[in-house]
Amino acid sequence: MLKAKDAASALTVIESGIPIDLLFTDVVMPGMLKSPELARKARERLPNLGVLFTSGYTENAIVHGGRLDPGVELLVKPYTREALARKVRHVLANHAQRKRG
């Protein structure tokens, strides 16, 4: 697991070439680069990247008309370890399916 203190640092990690399967980020991150933009830039570089957002807010920058962008998942806070594990497995399974297809 790799960690970054903000979205800009996360993008630096993504651009480093280290193999990454999943981007897990809070919708609200410190710094100038916002999480939805981070996800967009990350998927430009890694098209099959799984993206999992988390948020304590029901209305936020990644929900458009009640829908998430294709390939983007949301885990609402607070969540249990089991809910996190289920969602991560789901996103990684979809990631593996995109890689094959």
Image: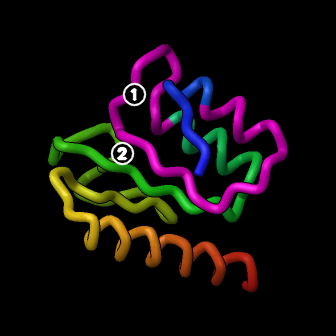
Whether residue 1 is situated above or below residue 40 in the rendered picture = below
Q: Quadrant of residue 74?
A: bottom left
Q: Compute the Cα span from label 2 to label 1.
A: 13 Å
Residue at the spot x=27%, y=73% of the render? Answer: 82
**Residue 17 located left or right of residue 83:** right
Q: Nearer the viewer, mark 2 or mark 1?
A: 1
Residue that carries the numbered disc 1 in the rendered image: 29
Residue at the spot x=16%, y=52% of the render? Answer: 78
Residue at the spot x=49%, y=71% of the render? Answer: 91
Based on the picture, tell me whether residue 33 belongs to the magenta stretch: yes
Based on the picture, tell me whether residue 29 belongs to the magenta stretch: yes
Residue that carries the numbered disc 2 in the rendered image: 62
Q: Position of residue 75 (x, y in %)?
A: 29, 58
**Residue 59 located left or right of residue 47:** left
Q: Amino acid at mark 2?
A: Ile
- In this view, the residue in front, 64 or 8, is 8
Q: Position of residue 11 (x, y in %)?
A: 66, 33
Q: Earlier in the sequence, mark 2 or mark 1?
A: 1
Q: Position of residue 95 (x, y in %)?
A: 61, 73
Q: Quadrant of residue 12?
A: top right
Whether residue 92 is situated above or below residue 42 in the rendered picture = below
Tag shown at residue 14: none
Residue range in magenta is 10-36
| Badge 2 density bin: few <14, some 14–19, many ≥20, Cα 10 Å | some
Kindly state the secondary structure of the residue where label 1 is placed: loop
Q: Amino acid at mark 1?
A: Met
Q: Quadrant of residue 47?
A: bottom right
Q: Position of residue 101 (x, y in %)?
A: 73, 84
**Figure disc tally:** 2
In the orientation shown, which residue stands out farthest toward the top? 32
